[in-house]
Image: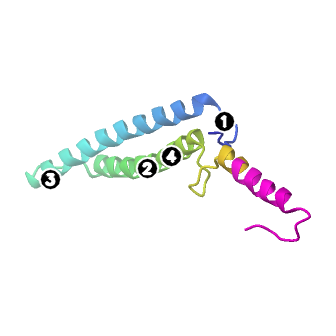
Amino acid sequence: MTVSTPAYHLDELADAEALFASVKRTLGELREEIESLKERARAGEDINATAAAKTISAATDVIGRCQKAELMLYDCRNRKAGIARGGVALDLDRVRADIGCKLDRLRSAIGTGTIPE
């Protein structure tokens, strides 16, 4: 099967996977920090509001980066698989065979006065 894909760097997929894994690790660490803050608040401990706000802000930022990295990884995997943005891979061998069959039918109909279906 011949698949039409745009040229891309082989390292692009590896870079996207590494970025996504890194962002996921960071998000996991921030989730643990937020869980710790939540447990301390439930226990009635004093919580530094500035530190808590920074942690929550960082988590929000990392979630946005995680979503971007996930989309980049999705696009890279699709390009590697030959899947266009519409979600369809173009199988050039099959298309070539279909066109060849249609041309053969047209060639055989030349001079007969009928067009084959």
Marks 2, 4: nearer the viewer: 4
User: Which sits earlier in the primary sequence, circle 2 or circle 4?
Assistant: 2
Q: Are marks 1 and 3 in contact (CB under 8 Å)?
A: no
Amino acid marked by disc 1 = Tyr
Q: Nearer the viewer, residue 5 or 101?
A: 101
Residue identifier under label 2: 61
User: Which sits earlier in the primary sequence, circle 3 or circle 4?
Assistant: 3
The crowding category of the residue bearing disc 2, from other C-alpha atoms within 10 Å (few below 14, some 14 to 19, many at least 20), is few
Residue 93 sits in quarter: top right
Range shown magenta: 97-117
Residue identifier under label 3: 41
Q: Nearer the viewer, residue 22 or 1?
A: 1
Q: Secondary structure at mark 2?
A: helix
Amino acid marked by disc 2 = Asp
Residue identifier under label 1: 8
| Figure check: 20 above or below 49 | above
Numbered circle sitting on residue 74: 4
Which residue is most to the bottom?
114
In this rendering, position of residue 24 left or right of residue 108: left
Amino acid marked by disc 4 = Tyr
For the point 58% across and 38% down, the residue is 80
User: What percent of the width, then of the height, locates residue 34?
Assistant: 25, 48
